[in-house]
Image: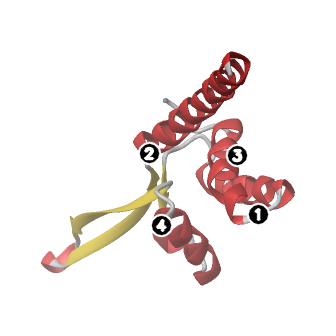
Amino acid sequence: MDIVTFDVLFEVLRKLLGKRGMEEKEIRDLTLYVLNFFGYDDIVVDNILTPTDRHVFNTLEELGILTTIEDEVTVARGKLWRIHYWTYRKDNIERILNEEEKEEEESAEDIYRRIFQDEEE
């Protein structure tokens, strides 16, 4: 996955948060909210986030959608400066998309299996 698009992020959030009772409009708004930070990039500098933004990102981190990384840079006078970033966990995003598709396929197979079992009895 090169770029996390609106459709991909919306589908992942719908699968994760829809089960928790979040409505599709709220999920759509959240998707746009997150994409406004990332755009077509995969990384966001943490210091541009407000406390509310950071809370949302921490929640997405708990869901396995985002993760943090840090970089250390030596600045004037030998001081160490740590820069914190947020980035997508594309491996988890792909896994979530694929797992749900497999579960849907399995449930369809279960339905057919039950239909044929009922006919045999």
- In the rendering, at what x and y percent does residue 43 appear? 47, 52
Which residue is denoted by mark 3 in the rendering? 10
N-term mark: 3 or 1? 3
N-term mark: 4 or 2? 4
Question: Which mark's residue is nearer the viewer, 4 or 1?
Answer: 1
C-alpha gap between disc 4 and disc 1: 16 Å
Q: Secondary structure at mark 1?
A: loop
Left or right: where 59 falls relative to 119: left
N-term mark: 4 or 3? 3
Which residue is denoted by mark 2 in the rendering? 92
Question: Which mark's residue is nearer the viewer, 3 or 1?
Answer: 1
Which residue is denoted by mark 1 in the rendering? 22
**Mark carried by residue 62:** 4
N-term mark: 2 or 3? 3
Residues 98 and 121: in front is 121
N-term mark: 4 or 1? 1
C-alpha gap between disc 3 and disc 1: 12 Å
Mark 1 crowdedness (10 Å alpha carbons): few <14, some 14-19, many ≥20: few
Mark 3 crowdedness (10 Å alpha carbons): few <14, some 14-19, many ≥20: some
**Which residue is pictured at 62% across the width and 54% down the height?**
16
